[in-house]
Image (cartoon, rainbow, N blue to C red):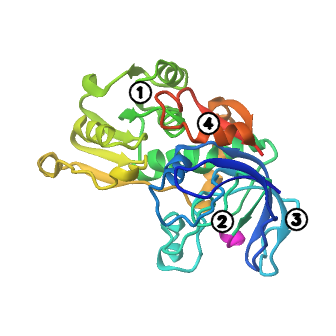
Amino acid sequence: MKAAIYETFGGPIEIRELPNPTCSPHGVVVEVEATGLCRSDWHGWRGHDPDIPLPNIPGHELAGIVVEVGDLVERFAVGARITVPFVNACGDCPPCRRGDQQVCDVQTQPGFTHHGSFADRVALEHADVNLVLLPDEIDFDTAASLGCRFATAYRAVVQVAGVQRGDVVAVHGCGGVGLSAVMIAASRGAHVIAVDPASASRELARTLGATEAYSDASSVRDVDVSLDCFGAMETMRASIGCLRPRGRHVQVGLLGENGSPTVDMGRVIAKELQVLGSHGMSAHTYPAMLAEISAGTLRPQALVREVIGIEEAAARLMTLDASGAGAGGVTIVHP
């Protein structure tokens, strides 16, 4: 198969012909039809997660067709159109048994714990727990945009923050996750404030339901829910700082090498703020989101700005830290 691969953190990402992945007894092999270009893979390539085994194929937002099925898989067959959360759960640890597969104790993640989806094919573990069948009306490009960004935003807005009609919601960072959060919060009847330095992202946020949009957070005050969808000390602090008393901050964006920032806990205590984390979304909770997409209530396809090939994706991934590199929506890769 053809794949993008790097051998050292921060080193070149090359396109090579590699052996096809093998199928485990409880897993599947998927022919990748579409995969997302995501800043999380940039963090991985930079070495912000030093546990990634090298060499590594990045890519964790994917949709495709099952081409091999392990002997122990019961719910899926060759030919199934599927997507998958970026957290692949074991299904048997205490969090999994509670239904919290997104925080599985022994999770695998394509592109991080094993070779990912910047390739013709990818192996996925524990298929019966992790695979999600796609409705016919959802195409592969739309499905690939769900895995890390839209589904992550859906859980953060709906399941973690519990956004309701009339809430004032601030979204800090309007890349793929942030724009998804804008759309989802607006669909709940929230008053949404988008914050992003890139004018293209602010303009798109308005078209997706944001009532206000600013280049920085200095004008944002007294909000009910604030989400840091970018992942930096500055955006995290701005998100916590703009909350009303008893407001809710949700940390969605990865903080990378600054993963242990200082937090003004005095303010958190005095204002009785809630500081929450959100990490992906379990496969068993996808149906409600997919139903809203099928009904047209949510339109993640509106976030897809371009489709590129694997060669361009490899080059783009290495520049995702550049100013404005993630502005304006989601980039989909066709391997």
- C-alpha separation, residue under disc 1 versus residue under disc 4: 22 Å
Q: Nearer the viewer, mark 1 or mark 2?
A: 1
State the extent of the magenta-drawn residues as a range.
Answer: 125-130
Residue nearest the viewer, comparing 102 with 298: 102
**How busy is the neighbourhood of tag 3: few (under 14 within 10 Å), some, or many (20 plus)?**
few
Q: Which type of secondary structure does the marked residue at label 3 adopt? A: loop
* Residue at the spot 51% in from the left edge and 34% down from the top edge: 175
Q: Which mark is residue 243?
A: none
Of marks 1 and 4, which one's residue comes earlier in the chain? 1
Residue type at mark 2? Asn
Q: Inspect this view and state whether residue 259 appears.
A: yes
Of marks 2 and 4, which one's residue comes earlier in the chain? 2
Residue tagged 1:
196
- C-alpha separation, residue under disc 1 versus residue under disc 2: 33 Å
- C-alpha separation, residue under disc 1 versus residue under disc 3: 43 Å
Residue nearest the viewer, comparing 10 with 120: 10
- C-alpha separation, residue under disc 2 versus residue under disc 4: 22 Å
- C-alpha separation, residue under disc 4 versus residue under disc 3: 29 Å
Residue tagged 4:
298
Q: Nearer the viewer, mark 2 or mark 4?
A: 2
**How busy is the neighbourhood of tag 4: few (under 14 within 10 Å), some, or many (20 plus)?**
some
Residue type at mark 4? Leu
Residue type at mark 1? Asp
Report whether 39 appears left or right of 72. Answer: left
Q: Which mark is residue 78?
A: 3
Q: Inspect this view and state whether residue 138 appears.
A: no
Q: Which mark is residue 130?
A: 2
